[in-house]
Amino acid sequence: MTVRSACICFILAVSIYLVSFGGCSSWIQERGGQEDFDPQERRMVLEDVWPEGCISCHKVSGPQDHTLATIVNEHLQGHPAVDSKNIKECMECHRPGEERFYHRLHVSHMNSRIFTELLDSSCIGCHQMEEKGEIFIKGLR
């Protein structure tokens, strides 16, 4: 099995888990033998809280500029200056399947307390699954 196939299998398994149980950091509470989700978990499962993927969070919000271009230009030493407004523009240089790029994105988000706790996000913040089960990055379709 290639690394790419293993990653796809892993993402699929995590997505199935998320759809079934409501979130990576959430736990199902048993009440009278029935599963009960808290209101935020239910909202995350039933509606797409982050419909635009990256730019749902990476945007100007009041005085704060969290756009992709600002994050890259101010925080990634050695990266050429960019004016990227969305993930499609990032993909002009970072090709799909570029393992180092995707690994860095996963590590920086899944290890971020802002992403996982404050925003209560998980895999479904960035990824979406089509009806046929194919998983993709929001903003690239």
Image (spheres, rainbow, N blue to C red):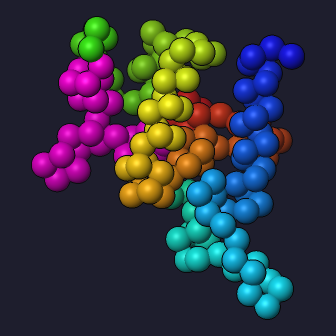
Residue 119 located left or right of residue 45: left
Q: Is residue 27 above or below residue 7?
A: below
Write the start and end of the magenta stretch as one range: 51-76
Q: Is residue 6 magenta?
A: no
User: In this orientation, which residue lies closer to the viewer: 94 or 106?
Assistant: 106
Quadrant of the frame with the C terminus: top right
Q: Residue at x 23, y 50 (%)?
A: 61
Which residue sits at x=47%, y=51%?
116
- Residue 70 on the magenta segment: yes
Toward the viewer: 47 or 39?
A: 39
Q: Nearer the viewer, residue 12 or 110?
A: 110
Q: Is residue 128 left or right of residue 40?
A: right
Q: Quadrant of residue 75?
A: top left
Give the x, y percent position of residue 92: 46, 12
Residue 140, image x, y percentages: 55, 30
Q: Residue at x 83, y 86 (%)?
A: 33
- From where the camera sits, is residue 47 visible? no
